[in-house]
Amino acid sequence: MKLLRVQTGTLKGKSIETPPAIAGNMNFTPAVIKKSVFDVLGSLVLKGRLIPEDSAFIDFFAGSGQMALEAVSRGFGRVVLYELAWERSDSLRKLFDKIGGAKEIFRKDVFRFYDKLDIPEKSKVYFLDPPYSFWDKKNEKLKSLAEALLKEESTVIVFVQSPVSPGWSDFVTRKFGKNFLTYRVRGMEDFESETKEAEDTNVEGSESDGDEVPGREG
């Protein structure tokens, strides 16, 4: 069974097992994408746009929960996970019960319940890693979801991982090996442009640093 490791923070080096496969799918967020997500968040912290301890990290289509676990390790005040598969949601509850801290884990449909959160944190970061099959017919539905999240005043940034470039205008999209990371910062278009230029010098084509399998599902 593949192990997924926390990259840095208070839980650095902690390994978790991959959750049960769904329809034979055992792919997870590559380490290089995870690093890029938290590098972008680090830039927002430096610019005074994000205070992790006062913010919630919301992991939609959570899968293994490794992105939320990384957020816990890096000091986010709360993590929220949505995972519809029974076995995976149960695995997430057991994992985060052991970790402790403020967390909410829901077995709910993201599209129907994304706006039903009732949490005290004044800032929110969203990470979406939907099943690869969604990109065949649900590209516009996923874009509408991302745009709806960005309309919320509490939203700081929305990230989306995908196997193809979504082709969304007004979003930054970067390619890492066979995967794409797309994101937009609410109300900070200049930040997005600067980050896109900076990432042109980043490593492109690397799929993993050895602690994860490239792919989908958290």
Image (spheres, helix red, strand yellow):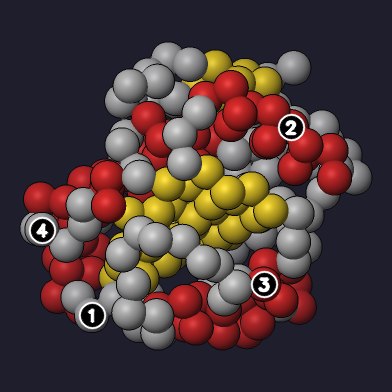
| Disc 2 element | helix
**For marks 3 and 1 on the same chain, the one whose residue lies earlier in the sequence:** 3
Q: Residues within 10 Å of mark 4 (few under 14, many from 20)?
A: few
Cα–Cα gap, marks 3 and 4: 30 Å
Please provide percent x and percent y for residue 167: 50, 78
Closer to the camera in the image, 192 or 47: 47
Residue pictured at 60% horizontal, 73% vertical: 116
- Seen in the image, is 210 located left or right of residue 78? right
N-term-proximal mark, 4 vs 1: 4
**Mark-to-mark CA distance, 1 and 2:** 36 Å
Q: Where is residue 173 in the image (x, y as percent from the top left)?
A: 40, 66
Image quadrant where residue 34 sits = top left
Say which mark, if any, is on residue 117.
none
**Which residue was labeled with disc 3?**
113
Residue at image mark 1: 187
Q: x%, y% of residue 216?
A: 65, 48
Labelled disc at residue 91: 2
Q: How far apart are marks 3 and 1 (CA)?
A: 24 Å
Contact between labelled residues 2 and 3, with CB atoms less than 8 Å apart: no
Q: Tell me which residue sits at (55%, 59%) in the image.
A: 128
Closer to the observer: label 3 or label 1? 3
Residue 79 falls left or right of residue 85: left
Q: Which of marks 3 and 2 is nearer the N terminus?
A: 2
Q: In which quarter of the image is the N terminus?
A: top right
Whether residue 207 is visible: no
Nearest to viewer (mark 1 / mark 2): 2
